[in-house]
Amino acid sequence: MTAIEEHVLRLDPEEARRVRQERLERIGRWVLPLAIMILAIWLWDRICVWNDIPKYILPRPGVVLQTLFDDAGLLFSSLLVTLRVTFLSLLLAIVGGVGLAVLFAQSKWVEMSFFPFAIVLQVTPIVAIFPLINIYVDNQTTKLLLCAWIVAFFPILSNTTLGLNSVDRNLRDMFRLNGATRWQQLRYLRLPAAMPYFLGGLKIAGGLSLIGAVVAEFVAGATGQSSGLASRIIEAGYRLNAPRLFAALILISFTGILIFLVLSLISHLILRRWHESALKQER
């Protein structure tokens, strides 16, 4: 901080208070969740010790961490299988959701005709759809991919459609008065305006694609046909191997958090220079 800035802060108590509050918030944003997490892990460990709980019922955090290292080869190879289904389904959801949203934006008749089918796919539990998929699809990877895609598809379609239809009416009229074609309006007006909505849907779909992949693996893993993390959880449950079960659950949780953080970073990098949602708000 320069001498001029320090002089201004000394002359302006309100500004000094605002700077201190911002500094505390920046520190608290990381310190508070970390402190709560450490406290929760400590309580978990103490509960196991105080109640003398055997590790096949509730393992201590140290045992879970040791199992995560000991079984790293098995667990991380299964994680790669789950991630492959997750990212492929997310990619298909992006292509299909954005493509269909553009068609909806170009024709209300298309939207009225097909949007109800998208809603039906969204509200129907995937565990109820999987038996039908299991009958009609032979390839195991395709089954898992289709299930994860169904879960991740609707948020992208819904949010992108909302963004394309939320363009300012005055800007739309201005484009028309200047002779812009429908596709020019789409490229230069509607798609940029829909970008924040799409990115919001993408962050939701990223987590849902992982959930869909794991749920699909659970259903398929019940017959021993899947080698993803969900099948490792089922296997560990049957063998009362609670440390491996907890290690797999923690691995899934951290993977979901990492996916959300990466997609949030991508969203911020895209929007930070031009959209109000990413610009630093003045207080």
Image (cartoon, helix red, strand yellow):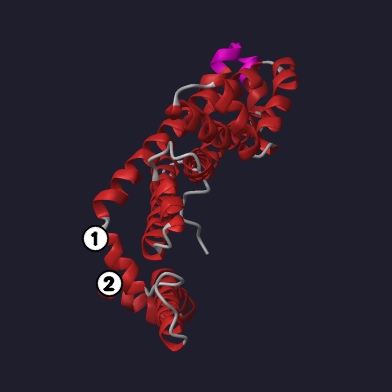
Label 1 residue SS? helix
Q: Is residue 16 above or below residue 266?
A: below
Q: Is residue 143 above or below residue 27?
A: above
Amino acid at pointer 1: Asp
Quarter occupied by the N terminus: bottom left
Instruction: Look at mark 1 in the image and give the residue it sits on.
Output: 70
Image side of residue 156 versus residue 170, left or right: left
Quarter-of-image position of residue 140? top left
Q: Residue at x 55, y 28 (%)?
A: 134
**Distance from label 2 to label 1 (Cα)?**
49 Å
Q: Label the magenta part by its dominant secondary structure.
A: helix
Depth order, front residue of 38/24: 38
Query: How many residues crowd around disc 1 within 10 Å: few (fewer than 14), some, or many (20 or more)?
Result: few
Label 2 residue SS? loop
Instruction: Look at mark 2 in the image and give the residue it sits on.
Output: 1
Image side of residue 11 versus residue 157, left or right: left
Depth order, front residue of 66/194: 66
Q: Residue at x 46, y 81 (%)?
A: 13
Percent position of residue 246, x then y? 41, 62
Quarter-of-image position of residue 22? bottom left
